[in-house]
């Protein structure tokens, strides 16, 4: 089978390419450059040029064909511009989820098909299965990776059946130490290279500086809300998912001014760093932002009630089912395990399909539910669906 591997210059995609060749596939390496601007990039982060050099070294070692493609225009339009737009609205997007849906398994996939690819492989720690139903229709499943410390299925939670039909994840059954070992045994140049961090294809950034490319600074006030504020009391039944999904409606009258900031759109719920206020017994955390009035609300301590909510809401247009045949109907309730951020342990919850969208009612209050992020729900190891948190 002719397989195009997204060689990123990292150890994971390198080993994925090696394993595919060992399995007898015709393997082609394709490196994509998605970002040119270094605004806000932290010193010491590997530039894209180094990534390409390492990708080429791996291709030569494995004796496979190598190609390069520049997708920076599409990446800016589909991922970065979306990021700017969401932050401007006071929401916190997840560019890595978008990158996989919009770039790696869309634009990049189309480039791979131009090279005659029958499948496209990446170095993600996740797995894929296919089943054929009684009518002969093939259904594709997205499963968590075998390494619980590296499982990346959350980042792929927006993939469609068509995208999964082309996908291959050769290292999904391996543990990270095994991947490193294989790379060293095969003398791959990436064997000891550090894993990439930060925004997909951009790297580690000073987020406010990065966002200032499009979002202007604007001085505003920081107000502290004490934990015993009546705002954190919701008089409702335990299963009143509508009320429980509502964010806390904080106002400047609920607390006192304790400092200033340079733009509410630079902050997100649960954030601790960057507030510039010290002298506290416990750390201050952002518990609310108001981009309209340019106010940040903070609370002291990791157990502050303003950090926790028991439910969230996803609009109808933002609900995604990996297999649409599994979609819930209005009035239906189902139990799933859910996560609202990468690496968060799965949380027990009930999903409730209503006329105005999907509600997720957790068994326990969740820390830092943030509009713009993705909630993904699982049935065992199977990623059933996901959606953008509306509130």
Image (cartoon, rainbow, N blue to C red):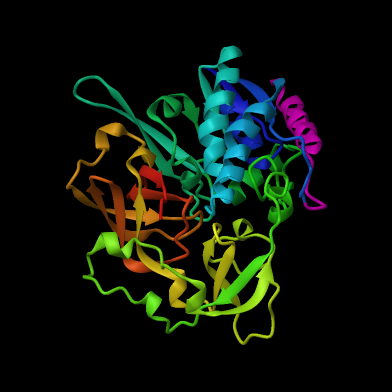
At x 69% / y 32%, what residue is drawn?
34
Q: Out of 276 and 219, give the one closest to the viewer.
A: 219
Q: Is residue 60 above or below residue 252?
A: above
Q: Which residues are magenta?
A: 42-65
Relative to the observer, which residue lies in front, 154 or 4? Answer: 154
Q: Main secondary structure of the magenta part?
A: helix
Q: Residue at 69% across / 59% down in the picture?
A: 218
x, y (%) of residue 229?
Answer: 42, 81
Q: Say whether residue 269 is visible.
A: no
Where's residue 66, x and y in %? 71, 21
Q: Quadrant of the C terminus?
A: bottom left
Residue 309: say if magenta. no
Task: Tell me which corner region of the image, top left, top right, bottom left or bottom right, holds residue 160.
Answer: top left
Q: Is residue 62 magenta?
A: yes
Instruction: Give whichever of 261, 268 is nearer the camera.
Output: 261
Residue at coordinates 80% horizontally, 35% vertically from top-left? 49
x, y percent for residue 323: 32, 34
Q: How many marks?
A: 0
């Amino acid at each position: 089978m002719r397989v195009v591997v997204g060689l990123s210059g990292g150890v994971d995609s390198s080993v994925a390419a090696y394993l595919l060749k060992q399995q007898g596939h015709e393997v082609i390496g394709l490196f994509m450059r998605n970002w040119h601007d270094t605004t806000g990039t932290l010193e010491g982060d590997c530039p894209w040029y180094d990534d390409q050099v390492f990708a080429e070294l791996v291709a030569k070692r494995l004796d496979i064909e190598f190609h390069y493609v520049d997708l920076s225009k599409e990446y800016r339009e589909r991922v970065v511009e979306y990021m700017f737009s969401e932050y401007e609205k006071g929401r916190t997007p997840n560019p890595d989820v978008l990158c996989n849906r919009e770039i790696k398994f869309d634009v990049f996939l189309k480039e791979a098909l131009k090279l005659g690819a029958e499948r496209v492989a990446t170095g993600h720690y996740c797995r894929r299965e296919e089943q054929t139903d009684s009518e002969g229709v093939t259904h594709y499943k997205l499963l968590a990776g075998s390494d619980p410390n590296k499982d990346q299925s959350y980042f792929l939670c927006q993939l469609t059946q068509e995208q999964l039909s082309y996908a291959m994840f050769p290292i999904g059954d391996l543990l990270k130490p095994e991947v490193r070992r294989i790379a060293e045994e095969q003398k791959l140049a990436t064997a000891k290279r550090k894993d990439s961090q930060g925004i997909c294809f951009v790297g580690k950034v000073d987020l406010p500086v990065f966002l200032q490319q499009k979002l202007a600074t604007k001085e505003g006030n920081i107000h502290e809300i004490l934990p015993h504020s009546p705002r954190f009391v919701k008089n409702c039944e335990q299963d009143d998912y509508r009320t429980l999904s509502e964010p806390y409606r904080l106002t400047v009258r609920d607390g006192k001014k304790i400092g200033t900031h340079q733009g509410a759109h630079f902050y997100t719920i649960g954030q601790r760093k960057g507030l510039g206020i010290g002298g506290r017994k416990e750390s201050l955390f952002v518990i609310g932002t108001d981009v309209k009035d340019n106010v940040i609300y903070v609370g002291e301590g990791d157990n502050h009630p303003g950090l926790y909510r028991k439910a969230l809401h996803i609009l109808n247009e933002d609900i995604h089912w990996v297999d649409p045949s599994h979609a819930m109907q209005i009035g239906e309730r189902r139990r799933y395990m859910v996560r609202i951020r990468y690496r968060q342990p799965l949380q027990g919850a009930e999903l409730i399909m209503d006329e105005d969208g999907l509600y997720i009612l957790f068994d326990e209050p969740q820390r830092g539910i943030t509009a713009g992020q993705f909630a993904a729900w699982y049935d065992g190891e199977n990623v059933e669906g996901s959606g953008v948190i509306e509130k």
